[in-house]
Amino acid sequence: MNKNHPVYHSLVARLESLREQYRQHPSERNRYRLVRQEQLIAQWVAASDLPATASFPPMGVAPTAATT
């Protein structure tokens, strides 16, 4: 799937939404959903085209805000 495909854009938009949810409310459930979305994208997209992955802090430690 190329980067201009509408499904790719939808998957990445969902991934960003899940990342934001995990930043705001770190929990095992949100982390699981985020990892599953990354795995789903990895099934359809070449590794070089994957969006940058978030690093996960240990549970109980609040994740830091992403810098832009």
Image: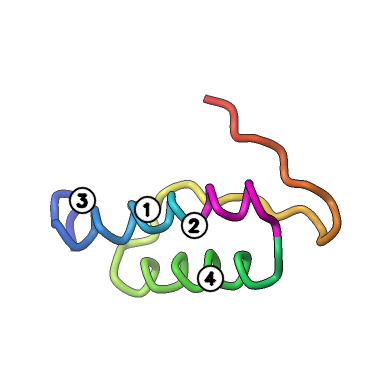
**Residue holding disc 1:** 48
Magenta region, residue range: 19-26
Seen at 46% across and 65% down, the residue is 38
Label 1 or label 2, whichever lies nearer to me, is 2
Say which element carries label 3. loop
Say which element carries label 2. helix
Label 4 or label 3, whichever lies nearer to me, is 4
Label 2 or label 3, whichever lies nearer to me, is 2
Mark found first going from the N terminus, 3 or 1 = 3
Mark found first going from the N terminus, 2 or 4 = 2
Specify the amino acid type for callout 2: Leu
Q: Measure how far apart labels 2 and 3 are at the Cα level.
A: 20 Å
Q: Are marks 2 and 4 in contact (CB under 8 Å)?
A: yes
Specify few, some or many for label 2: CA neighbours under 10 Å numbering under 14, 14-19, or 20 or more. many
* Quarter holding residue 31: bottom right
Q: Measure how far apart labels 2 and 4 are at the Cα level.
A: 7 Å
Q: Measure how far apart labels 4 and 1 are at the Cα level.
A: 22 Å
Q: Measure how far apart labels 4 and 3 are at the Cα level.
A: 22 Å
Specify the amino acid type for callout 4: Arg
**Picture disc at residue 33:** 4
Prevailing secondary structure class for the magenta stretch in the rendered image: helix
Q: Measure how far apart labels 3 and 1 are at the Cα level.
A: 11 Å
**Residue holding disc 3:** 3
Q: Are marks 4 and 3 in contact (CB under 8 Å)?
A: no
Figure coloring: rainbow
- Return the residue found at the far top: 68
Q: Is residue 14 above or below residue 41?
A: above
Q: Measure how far apart labels 1 and 2 are at the Cα level.
A: 21 Å
- Return the residue found at the far right: 60
